[in-house]
Image (spheres, rainbow, N blue to C red):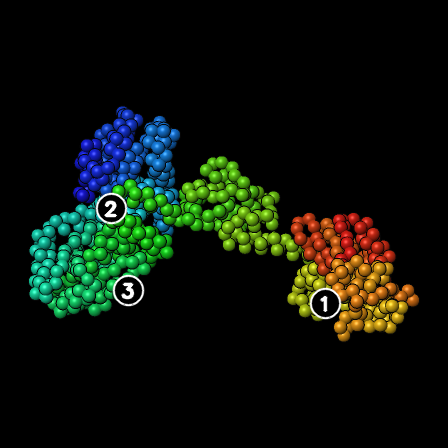
Amino acid sequence: MDRTDKRIVRFGEIMDMVKSYYPDADLDLIRAAYVYSARVHQGQTRMSGEPYLTHPVAVAAILAQMKLDEASVVTGLLHDTVEDTLTTFEDIERYFGTEIATLVDGVTKISKIAFQSKEERQAENFRKMILAMSRDIRVLLVKLADRLHNMRTLSHMPREAQIRISRETMEIYSPLAARLGIFWLRTTLEDLAFEYLEPDRYEFIQKRLEESVEEREEYVNKVLNIIGEKLEKENIKAITKGRNKDICSIHRKMLSQKLEFDQLHDLTAFRIILDSVSECYTVLGLIHALWRPVPGRFKDYLAMPKSNGYQSLHTTVIGPEGHRIEIQIRTHEMDLIAEEGIAAHWSYKEGRSVTPEDTRVVNWLRQMMEWQQDLEDPREFLENVRVDLYPDEVYVFTPRGDVKEFPRGSSPLDFAYSVHTEVGNSCIGARVNGKMVSLKYELVTGDTIEIITSAHQKPGKDWLKHVKTGRARTKIRHYLMSQEREKTIEIGRDSVERELRRWKIDLNRVEKDGGILKIAQEFNFKTELELYVAIGHGRQSAKAIVTKLVPQSEREQQKIIALEEKLKTPKRPTGKSGVKVQGLSDMLVHFAKCCNPLPGDPIQGFITRGRGVTIHKIDCVNLPDADPKRIVEASWDDDQSLVRTVKIGLISENKPGMLAAISGVFTSNDSNIIQANVVSFDETNARGTFLVGVRNVEHLTRIINALKKVKGVREVERRGTV
Ligand code: MN
């Protein structure tokens, strides 16, 4: 193929080409597409003054030269109809079917992406975005053919457009061609773009190449002859060739090695292609015997293929006339893979590392190549390549035109948190492609996202359901935790304040004096806030603060004694059990944890092995399973005054002062709190469990009724177990 072909192609040539490599192709479909394209583009002209139709025809011809299926060729003919004429997706679907319509739609979508970002690092994201949008690889092939023809006819465009389009080609499309393994397309696009981007350099190198063409040819032939003779003598069959490097890569080499043109002697890469791997090593030995190898330049990609599968031996030697020459030695099979561009030639030369995505694409392309060899029908071949190249990611635009990558399923919140924590925390929604969407919206590749914020917004727990990125999740959790902590601090401080008020002590003053901090440290907390958190959670009692503060006051001495007495009240009752088993009051008994009977509850005993009698409520769910012979009659001993521990669970409003109000009920009902635990389980509700001492069921009922009357308490219940 003439790579800079600017000739206008006749439609008949396309038909001939398709027929030659694919005799069974649906030529009528291709003809119909040509007629349709001619009709809708009628009257349109290109910048060159030629009829617009010449462009889709040329694109179709490039696709036919690449021996693609008829759907690709048809898409080439139709690729600009939806974008540049009144034709709709539905029209194409009606006349040419869904497959072609989807392909045309894919090309149209890529064409609409505006590469407005100036940042170099964005180029990779643009490339990924295009790959992700080209679910069907034919979309990308048509797009690349379109770009190739546009580059070939770029001279008719204004200078500004030439530079913009060439930069896009250099940064986006030629690397994509390389990634797809189409080496010739990559170098052609690159050289065309280079010619516009740096016309002086291009002309300089081109001129020097032309000047030295005879001299170089002579030298190349000399080298090839020496190699040929040597191999013949050893009876080794080989194909040898010298390939001229393209202008852009010569330029890069001059830049990277800081060389003048005259100092470049390896403008030709020599290649020796052999039948077997063992021959490759034999020939390497012969070459190194012929010419002295340059130290450090030998690479064995045979034994250690590159991560993308590229295999070859590379060496640089001091050839005839003392010039350095590069020689690659490989088998036919390896050469096919490398030539067809499957190997990441580009990543090697440009010093880029190969990412897992690249490897995935390369592997998939290699598989594609293998299929191609097995299949007679190119249509079958391309039908197998509809794969999602980036199944786990989406690529979206910022309002400035940068591309950002997100996991699939991400929402505007993920986007907002990727901008800034504050943007995330105050995000109320987004405009996607100009339309308002909710926080639940799932980002789609190609979307342009604009975040809407409000100063009144606050993150909620349900936000966690709508985010996919770790960053957003962490930031939301962090916010929620800090909110919860603030609430807990408030509850804790409130109950301390209430306790102190009973002793006419002003908490603010004690805080200012550093008194609270001192107490906090005595209890092994770093700050007073941590102390309040512990009190808010019920891990630390507020009354303990009073005992630390109040003894300093002479006037309150009496009350302190009373208080200390009260605090000394045993937490668990000791002594007699308060239960009669079969009329006897001095039996070894203990109370079952499963139902925790209280004086007043009807009870039964269960004879354990070695631990006396366990007292259960008569309706305890565990009793029916027990051996009936071991169940004994039991009753409460009314003569004994007994305090039993019971667990009370409650749900209340999540507001300051709640814990204090609840504690007050226990105190005023003469019930000791042994343990309290309060957790706020959402924004409005808190759950509390209290272990308290009660005398009997009647006492408990009185406490529960009093608790139910506390404003803000929603539910109170006795818990069966302790
Ligand atoms: Mn086009």
Disc sitting over residue 185 in the figure: 2
The three-letter amino acid code for the residue at tag 2 is Leu
| Number of marks | 3
Q: What residue lies at 29% left-to-right and 58% top-to-bottom?
A: 309
* Secondary structure of residue under mark 3: loop
From what the image shows, is residue 609 above or below residue 276?
below
Q: What residue lies at 48% left-to-right and 41% top-to-bottom?
A: 450
Report x, y in % for residue 284. Answer: 17, 66
Q: Quadrant of residue 241?
A: bottom left
From the image, tell me which residue sits under label 3.
Answer: 304
From what the image shows, is residue 296 above or below residue 308?
below
Q: Nearer the viewer, mark 1 or mark 3?
A: 3
Q: Nearer the viewer, mark 3 or mark 2?
A: 3
Mark 1 to mark 3 CA distance (whole Å): 68 Å
Is residue 247 rendered to the left or right of residue 492? left
The three-letter amino acid code for the residue at tag 1 is Ile
Q: Residues within 10 Å of mark 2 (few under 14, many from 20)?
A: many
Disc sitting over residue 519 in the figure: 1
Mark 3 to mark 2 CA distance (whole Å): 28 Å
Q: Quadrant of residue 264?
A: bottom left
Q: Pointer 1 and pointer 3: residues touching (CB < 8 Å)? A: no
Is residue 477 rendered to the left or right of residue 147? right
From what the image shows, is residue 571 above or below residue 209?
below
Near-viewer residue (368 or 310)? 368
Regarding residue 394, the answer to whether it shows in the image is yes
Report x, y in % for residue 597. Answer: 81, 62
Mark 1 CB in 8 Å range of ligand 1?
Answer: no
